[in-house]
Image: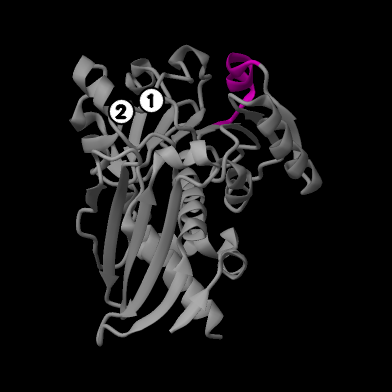
Amino acid sequence: MLIIDAERTRSLLPFAELVPALETAFCEPVEVPLRHNHSIAPDSDSPGCMLLMPAWNRQGFLGIKTVTIYPHNASKGRPGLHSTYMLHNAETGAPLALIDGNEITSRRTAAASALAASFLSREDAASLLVVGAGRVASLLAYAYRAVRPIRQVAVWDINPAQAATLVEQLQRDGFEAWVADDLEAACAHADIVTCATLSTTPLILRDWLRDGTHLDLIGGFTPQMRETDDACFAGTSVFVDTYEAVLKAGDLLSPLASGALLESDIRSNLASLCQGKHPGRATAKEITVFKAVGTALEDLAAAQLVYLQHSK
């Protein structure tokens, strides 16, 4: 069994290869059971949670991602989240590789965001607003550059120093980048607005979005988390990664409850976009919205790519 660490995993998942690998995976048969969610010592001083995300395909691969979340670790100076990925041979069950799960998750999340944008953003989109400056947010400009001619990148974060650090990195890598002090003004400038935060209150308002904008929401994954107001889903073209998103994402649950969005208003999921069952963006002026919560299909596709690249 191979053990592939974070650095090697990162090197084997360039976005120019990962984005098309995800597109292929969404076009092929795959089994993705609902994720398991288990509370660990909920009545203790350090309660935790474990997520189990299995998937298998007809290419002979079976995998499961484990994620442990311990919020109280932050007060001890330790990471609150740990993730691993175990890849197996689907025909024999034999373990093939243990892969760094944090790199798998962050890179496939950014790549899926870019994949959706390849169908939903304008082809000439060149300016990007990144809301957030954490692990996933730091990858988004690079992922989007694999599908669109991104040259300008504004970064906003609740911690301006963290935003500045990301901006310096982007500038070193050839982007025209700056810290956004005013979110409303930054939205007015952006062709694509992508949000990767843990916010529980809306950060982006519908009134700030100009015609033709693509709004990408990948941060919120619980009913309590919000990155936008309800109005962002009224009169816009709404897409999701999987229909599981309507069960768990606060950004969708709130407008569905208020009537700003009907479930029948959701145009398509990512699989239908990849398979050509929906054309994606229809006009240059429409505002498109993509809400993602992640799927084990993406983890499996990324792990499969790592294994095959490593084995060359």
Residue 231 in the image: x percent, y percent? 36, 16
Task: Say above or below: 224 vs 137.
Answer: above
Q: Secondary structure at mark 1?
A: loop
Query: Are there few (<14), some (14-19), or many (20+) residues within 10 Å of tag 1?
Result: many
Tell me where residue 265 sits by quadrant: top left
The residue sitting at the front extreme is 45
Which one is nearer the viewer's eye here, 286 or 166? 166
Residue 312 in the image: x percent, y percent? 56, 86
Q: List the residue tagged with mark 1.
A: 226
Residue 309 in the image: x percent, y percent? 54, 78
Q: CA distance from mark 1 to mark 2?
A: 6 Å
Query: Is residue 218 visible to the viewer in this orientation of the structure?
Result: no
Q: Which residues are magenta?
A: 182-192
Task: Identify the residue shown where x is 61% and y is 43%.
Answer: 138
Which one is nearer the viewer's eye here, 244 or 98? 98
Query: Are there few (<14), some (14-19), or many (20+) residues within 10 Å of tag 2?
Result: many
Task: Identify the residue shown where x is 55% and y is 42%.
Answer: 77
Lower position in the chain sequence, tag 1 or tag 2:
1
In the picture provided, is 53 more to the left or to the right than 192? Answer: left
For the residue marked with disc 1, what is the amino acid? Arg
In the picture provided, is 122 more to the left or to the right than 220? Answer: right
Q: Is residue 231 magenta?
A: no
Tell me where residue 56 sits by quadrant: bottom left
Which secondary structure type mostly characterizes the magenta part of the structure? helix
Task: Say above or below: 246 vs 21.
Answer: above
Marks 1 and 2: CB-CB under 8 Å? yes
Q: Secondary structure at mark 2?
A: helix
For the residue marked with disc 2, what is the amino acid? Gly
Q: List the residue tagged with mark 2.
A: 250
Residue 52 in the image: x percent, y percent? 28, 57
